Image: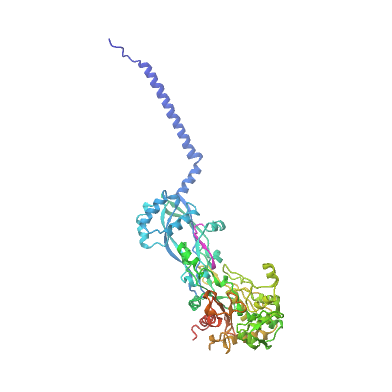
Amino acid sequence: MYPSTLKDYLRESRLFRSRAIIAALIVLLLLILLVMHLATLQIVDHTHFTTLSRDNRVKVEPLPPTRGLIYDRNGVILAQNLPTHSLEITPERVKDLDKTLEELGKLVPISDNDLKRFKRLKSHQRRFDSIPIRVQLTDEEVARFAVNRHLFPGVDIQAKLLRDYPLKDITAHILGYVGRINKKELQEIDNSSYSGTTHIGKNGVEKYYEEALHGEVGLQQVEVNALGRVIRVLENKPPQPGKDLHLTLDATLQRVAMQAFGEDNGAAVAINPENGDILAMVSKPGFDPNLFVEGISSADYNALQTSEDNPLFNRAIRGQYPPGSTIKPFIGLAGLESGVISATQKKFCPGFFQLPNHSHKYRDWKKTGHGAVDLNDAITQSCDVYYYDLALQLGIDKLAEYLAPFGFGEKTGVDITGELGGLLPSREWKKAAKKQPWYPGETLITGIGQGYFLTTPLQLASATATLAEQGIRLQPRIVKSIAQSNEATPTDQPVTRHPPVTKRSESNWDAMLSAMLQVTEGLRGTARNIRNDHYRIAGKTGTAQVFTVKQEEKYDEDKIDKKMRDHALFMAFAPAENPKIAVAIIIENGGHGGSVAAPIAKAIMDHHLLQGKQ
C-alpha cells in the first residue's frame, strides 16, 4: 500500500497570505521611510543641499593682479612681466600622485629640481591649491600635453605672467627680485589681498614697494563641469593692476659704472646733489635675479653662496668699510669751523706722529714725510701726520659731533631694503659697546678714517653730495615717481631734507673746495691722472687697511695675497663750481685710490656730464 499524499491546502493558503501581508508591510514601511527621507532632502534641507549643489557647479575664483612695472629715469624697462605657461597639479584632485608624476614625465621633461621644488611647495600649500611641476613650457610641450589632457585629471596648463629682469646682474642689488610666497610670509600677509597670488617681493625695491607694485586682487564667478573645468564665466570683478615705478636710476650709466670695474669687485654710488636722486648704484659682482623667480636650483644657489666673491652681498648699502683718507675733507672743515686751524697754517710732517710722552709712532703713508704742509697740501698730498695732529686738537667728541650731520654713523633712509648704518665712533659708543674708555691713540686713527670708523659707499656718496651742496643734506632716493599703469603723468616723490650742517664762514668751504680741486689738478695731487679739459673735479682719494701693519713692519703690496691688500677709495663731485653729480667708489683690495678708484669715478662722471656733448 502507498502512504497518503493529500495536502492541507487551507493551511498553506493561510501561511502564504500571512507572509504576503508581512512582506507588503515591510515594503510599505520602506516606502514610508523613503518618502520621509525625500521630504527631508527636498523640503527640510532644501536650502542646504541647493547651496552645496550650486557650489559644486559654481565656484568663485580670485583673479591675481598684474604686478607693476619698473622703469629707469629715461623709460628703460628694468622689471617686466612676460607671458609663459606652466604645468600645474592640484593634489586634491589627483588619486595617485606618484603615478601621475611618472606618466607626466613621459610627456614633458621633469627634472629632479622640478620635483624638489614641487614637493617643497606642496608641503606648505593647501591641497586645493594649484602647484607647478614645470614652468616656462615650450609651445611644443604645451601642445603635447593638451592632446593628452583627458588622461590627467587634476593636471592642467596655466597661462601666467612671469617676472623678468632684462639687465640681470647690472640692477640685481637695486631691484631685488620676487619669489614664491613661503610659509612664513603666508602667516604675515593679508590672505584676502594675496588670493591667487603666488609671488611676493623678497628684497630691494621689489620688497620696499611691494604694496604699490602688487595691486588689488579681483574675483570671478564661474560655472564648472564634473571634472572641475570652467564652462562659462557668470560674474567678473577685474583686478586692479599694480602701480609702475619710475626710478631715479640711469640704466645706461649703471652699465657704464659696472663695466668700469673690469675684473675688480667693489661698489660705486652716484648721486645728484641737487635732489638726492641716485643715478647709479653698483655692487660688483652681481647675480642673475631671474634664477630666483620660480625657485632657484640647489646647484645654482650653492654656487652663489660658496663663491669667494660673495655676489649676493650688496656692498653699496651693506658693505661697511673704513673711509680712509676720504674723510679728511670733512675733518678739515671741522678744524676750520671750530677755529682750531686756519687754511694757511702750516704743520711739519716728518713721516710720523707721536703723542706726548709716548714712544709709539703713528706713521704717515710717505715714510720720508711731507715737510711743512698747510690744509691745501694736506688734502692734495693726503698727509696723515697733519690729520693726526688735527684730530688730537679737536678731540673725539667734537669730531663725532661735527661728522654726524653729514650722515656718518646712521642709515641714509634710502628707499630700499637691507641698508646698514656704518659706525661713527665716539666716547659714548665705546663705553656702551665695549665697556672700555676712549684712548687718545684711537682719536688719531679716527682722524685718518681708520680704527672703528666704518661707512657704507652709499653713506660716503651722500656725505659727498652734502659737501658739494655746502652743508645741505638730502635723503638719497631710488624711486622718483609712482604711477598707475593707465595714468600718463606720474607724480614725483617728495625730496626729504635733513637739517643743514652748521657753517660759520663761506671762506672755509671755499678753502676746502680749492684743496679738493688740487687733488685732481695739482702737480702733486693723488688723483691728477683724471684731470680733463671739459669740467673740473673736486675729489679725495683714500686707502683703507684690511689688516694692521706692525710698528716695525713694511707694507709691501706685491708680497701679500690680493685678498689682504688695502681697499682703494675715491669720492668726488663735479662740475666743481655747480655740482651735478657726487660719486663714491670703493675697490676691494684695489690698493691705491688715485690709480684704481678715481678712473672709475671719472668714467661715471664723463658719461653723465658729457654724453652727447663731446
Q: How is the image coloured?
A: rainbow
Residue 202 is a magenta residue: yes
Q: Residue at x 45, y 63 (%)?
A: 299
In what quadrant of the picture does the N terminus appear? top left
User: Do we see residue 129 in this rendering?
Assistant: yes
The residue lying furthest to the bottom in this view is 523
Vertical order, 28 against 99 (above or below): above
Give percent across and percent down for residue 139: 37, 62
Vertical order, 272 against 215 (above or below): below
Task: Tell me the quarter of the picture where residue 344 sits.
Answer: bottom right
- Front residue of 95/129: it is 95
Residue 59 is a magenta residue: no
- Front residue of 570/282: it is 570
* Residue range highlighted in magenta: 195-204
Dominant secondary-structure state across the stretch colored magenta: loop
Left or right of 318, for residue 76 = left
Give percent across and percent down for residue 237: 50, 58
User: Do we see residue 235 in this rendering?
Assistant: no
